[in-house]
Every structure is written in C-alpha cells, then in structure tokens.
Amino acid sequence: MSSVTAPDLTALARSLDGAGEVREAGPEDVVDGVPAAVVARPTSVAAVSALLRTATGQGLVTVARGAGTALAWGCPPERVDLLLDTRGLDRLVEHEAGDLVVVAEAGLALRDLQAQVGRAGQELVADVPRERLEGGSTVGGALATGVSGVRRLQRLALRDLVLGTTVVLADGTIASSGGKVVKNVAGYDLAKLMTGAYGTLGVIVRAAFRLHPMRPARAYVLSTGPLAEVAERARAVVASQLAPAAVEIDRPAGSDEATLAVLLEGTDDAVAARAADAAALVGGAVGEEPAWWARLPGGEVLAKATATLTGVAGLLAAARAAEQAHAAGVALRGSAAGVLHAGITAPDAAALASVVAGLRAAAPSPGEGTVTVLSVPAALREGLDVWGPVGGLELMRAVKQRLDPGRHLAPGRFVGGI
C-alpha cells in the first residue's frame, strides 16, 4: 500500500462531477473505533467509479458505509482515509413483478425496498436482524455483511437470492455479473464473492434479487423446556412434513431452558391445520410472535455460531457450560437449522476468549460449524481470535490480491487481515 497522504478534497470533489458531495469527516464518522478523514456521498455508479479511481490514485484507503448498522462488525480497518457513504445510491432501478425480480441500488434501505415491492404483494426475504432493519440497513450493507435471517430454512440466505450484482473495484473498474431473471445464472459467483466480504474486494453499487409472493397467513407455535429437549423438538419439526417457514430457538443467558418458536406460512386453513399439528409434535401451543423474534441477543459481544442440525444441541450445552466455568453470560438465539447468534457478557478478555473457545469446541471444524465474533469492545479484544479456523484462507488472499492488489479497500476488516 502507498504511504499515508492527506486526502485532496478538491480532487475528490472534482471527480464526482456534480454527482454527489465531499466533506471533512466529523466525530460521528468512525468505523469500529477508527476515525475517517473524509466522507464522500456519490449519487451515481459513474461517480463511485471516478471517486475510487481518484482515491486510489492518491493512495487512500476507502471504506464503504451504508446506514452504519454493522460498522462494528468484523475487525477494525487499518485506517479510513475516505468513508464512502452509499446512501446517495438509493433508487429502486426496476421491479419486474411478473418475473418476481427487483433491481436496487446499494444505498436503498431494505425497509423502503420492502415497502415498494410489497405493494405488488411481494417481498425480498432478507430478514436482517430487526435492530438493523429499523436502523435503515441498506441493500449493500446487508450483502457486505452476509446476513442470514429467520426464514432461510425454506428460502435460503440473502446471498442465494442474488441474481446479479454491479460492483466498483478499487481502481474504478465497474464490474457486473449475473442477470435480472431467475433463469440467468451466468456470473453468479461474483455476487457470492462480494457477499460477506465486508467491502474488502469491491464496493457493491447495485444488485438484482429474486422475490417471493407474500403468503397471506402465518401462525407461531411456541414450546419451552430443557435445552436438550428443545433441541430435539426442533430437529423433529425441521425433519417433519410440516414445511415450517422458520424454526427458531431462544436460550436466555443463565437459563437451563430454551424456547422453541415455529413459524408456519400459507393460506388460512392450511396454516391453522399445520400449526395444530406442530403444536402436538413439540408439546407446545399456538401463540403470538415472541418479542425476541428476528432480534439479536443482548450482550457486550456479538458472535455468529453455525452448526449442523444435530450440532445445535451441543452449542446450547456449550453456552451453559461456558457460563458456569467463566462467570459469563451467553444468550443464544437463532435457527434450529444451525445459524445462531450469541450475545456474550464476560468479566474480562481472558474469560471471553475461553467462552469463545468453548463454543468453538462444540463446532469443531469449518465443515461442522464455526464461531465468528462479529463485534467486541476494544477492551475485550486482546488475545481474541475473532474469526477462528477458516478454510481456504490462501485462496481468499489470492482473490484480494487480484481484485485489490494495493489493499485500498477496507484492509484488515476481513479474515486473515484481508
């Protein structure tokens, strides 16, 4: 990477050619504790291209920001010379209701996108955590952080609904892949490559997604019990013919019990019948949407834990054991199919590292599960392996070298210092 130089605001502003604005950063312009020097808000793809070409030419490090609902996720960047605010790219480019396809710019808030396609009785099953949705989480931010929501059980994760993307590389190159119709999957890998890369490979500026028709009715079935029993009930529902839209588990910190919540969607009569069958299967009852539904668990530290379907019981047990061994709190919440979030409170950095190690022991390999620390206060970060074992790291570094050889895009934010 080039040596650190002061950003030339005049040149950066000129590069936008009137399509956006550039300003000095304020105290609120911080990425996980690292202050920015300059903030730019381009309003067109061409302006993003010209801006990045100019910034890279100046040797600047650029970090993209949407609504900022997950800027503390991942690792702090090495520095932030230019904070690229994507919210100037906030247009719904195209909505082909007949094809169940939408094309949106990266700075469009997901809640606004949902409102627009909802008028046609359709939805993008993004299901970002409710805190982020309410905070204005954007299309680009959701992709960059690789979110997966409660309804991924049937409709998969957001990355699987991407039909195509347009990204801008560090040198200003505009690259597109995929298409906007479901049958066209050419170039689909680029979209997956950018998803979950925390903006370290390119800046997502536009994406096309597959939509789903809204289902007219839904019902929740709730069941509470000992950890092992709830895990077994959850497995039974997932393996059943009930076709649940979501099967979620909530285990509060310090508790020997968990709550199972099953979501059924469809037509009124069918949902009612399936809900009754689900209640009988899990020994529960039909109820209201729980207050914790689609929300992140509380705690100083947020981690994402994955496991096989059979491994969820092990994660629940590991959370309780870690609490008892290290005077910590570990709330666990998420999909019974194996994608959960842990909210951890620990007395010190050493205890936190031990808690995370205990959870990783229950998810022993990238093939069987992982535990990634998404956000952690600086005081607890010392000695903590945020990412854990990662398969294919050398390949990831090679991709970074190919797409961003000068390490101008958010260096240090992703695994292995990428």
Image (tube, rainbow, N blue to C red):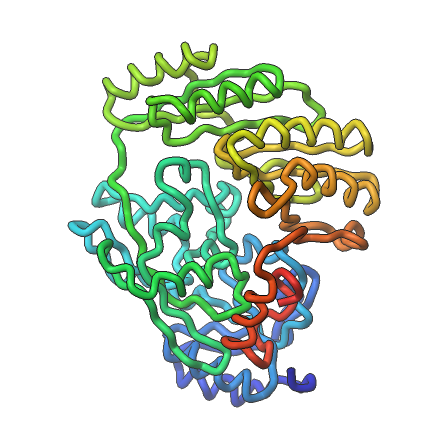
Q: Tell which of 395 and 356 is nearer to you.
A: 395
Image quarter of the C terminus: bottom right
Rendered residue at 39%/43% (across/down): 156
Residue 102 in view (yes/no): yes
Q: Is residue 287 above or below residue 300?
A: above
Residue 104 in view (yes/no): no
Q: Is residue 126 above or below residue 144?
A: above
Rendered residue at 48%/82% (across/down): 171
Image spot of residue 398 (x, y percent): 55, 72
Rendered residue at 40%/49% (across/down): 158
Image side of residue 61 versus residue 42, left or right = right
Q: Tell which of 148 and 102 is nearer to you.
A: 148
Q: Tell which of 365 and 406 is nearer to you.
A: 365
Image side of residue 94 versus residue 172, left or right = left
Q: Is residue 366 above or below residue 167?
A: above
Which residue reaches farthest left?
Answer: 98
Q: Tell which of 10 and 269 is nearer to you.
A: 269
Q: Is residue 57 above or below residue 398?
A: below
Q: Quadrant of residue 304?
A: top right
Image side of residue 61 versus residue 281, left or right = right
Image quarter of the N terminus: bottom right
Q: Quadrant of residue 280?
A: top left
Image spot of residue 364 (x, y percent): 65, 41
Rendered residue at 63%/39% (across/down): 363
Image spot of residue 286 (x, y percent): 41, 15
